[in-house]
Amino acid sequence: MHKSASRNISIFLTGFILLAWLIVLPSSLCAAGLHELSDTEMAGVYGYGFSTFSLNGDVVKLDFTGVTLSTWTEIASMKMGYYTKGTLGWDNDWENVSLGSSGTPLVLTGLYIEAGFSNITDPANRQLEYLRIGTPNMTGAVTAKFNSFSGTLNNGGTTYTRDTTFTNPTTITAAGTGFNLTLSRNGVGNQMGYSFNWVSATKTP
């Protein structure tokens, strides 16, 4: 792995974790002000089954099964992962991004945060290999001018690494299948750096 990539990924890691919490926290909490609740209101506040934690081998996973997000968001420019991988450039460089549309929002049903380690039981040699934010069920379209695109479609059946062929407006549509954003040190599925991964999706054109 290139040293510059390692430095860049370590810098981005903090922002990646903050992004995870921005995704899973309801927007009402992100913009909340102080409001005192009465004893009666406090007595009516409860929650259960919101999240589950699991450790499977070297993989730690936090599932938010009761969360559903729905959005139509437009972004002028989105860039992730600028470092040398063969040549200096961006893993993902997107312009005129639309997550969903005015008539059909992008919907995520269920969310998870997953971290994969090597040597997880050996504190002296334990290493974080990848961090992933995803959903088991995404419906809707992502449209953009992809100046550079890294990720996979169809459960890894089609892999792109800094691909530059989506320079015309392109739409990637998911119909109720999994999706994740992964930051990897060495390349989960041969994808070092930042990658966007659809379990099943159609790309047009």
Image (spheres, grey):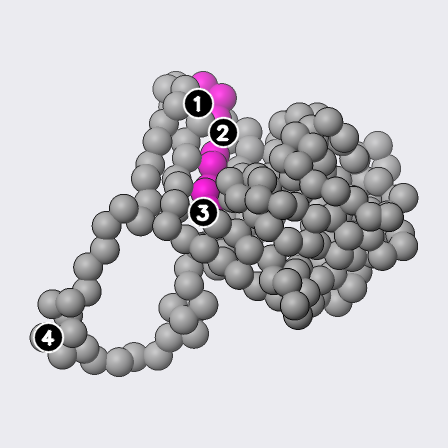
User: In the image, is residue 195 above or below residue 57?
Assistant: below
Q: Is residue 122 left or right of residue 85?
A: left
Q: CA distance from mark 2 to mark 3?
A: 20 Å
Q: CA distance from mark 1 to mark 2?
A: 6 Å
Give the mark nearest the N terminus, 4 or 1. Answer: 4
Q: Amino acid at mark 4?
A: Thr
Q: Residue at x 84, y 32 (%)?
A: 86
Q: Is residue 43 left or right of residue 21?
A: left
Q: Nearer the viewer, mark 3 or mark 1?
A: 3
> Front-most of 104 and 198?
104
Range of residues picked out in magenta: 111-120
Residue 141 on image: x %, y %: 69, 54
> Front-most of 141 and 54?
141
Q: Nearer the viewer, mark 2 or mark 3?
A: 3
Residue 169 on image: x %, y %: 85, 57
Callout 4 secondary element? helix
Q: Which residue is mark 2?
A: 116
Q: CA distance from mark 3 to mark 4?
A: 31 Å
Query: Magenta includes 135?
Result: no
Residue 161 on image: x %, y %: 79, 35
Query: Magenta includes 117?
Result: yes
Q: Which residue is mark 3?
A: 110
Q: CA distance from mark 3 to mark 1?
A: 22 Å
Q: Amino acid at mark 2?
A: Gly
Q: Which residue is mark 1?
A: 58
User: In the image, is residue 169 above or below residue 3?
Assistant: below
Q: Amino acid at mark 1?
A: Asp
Crowdedness near tag 1: few (<14), some (14–19) or many (≥20) residues, C-alpha within 10 Å? some
Q: Which residue is mark 4?
A: 40
Give the mark nearest the N terminus, 3 or 4. Answer: 4
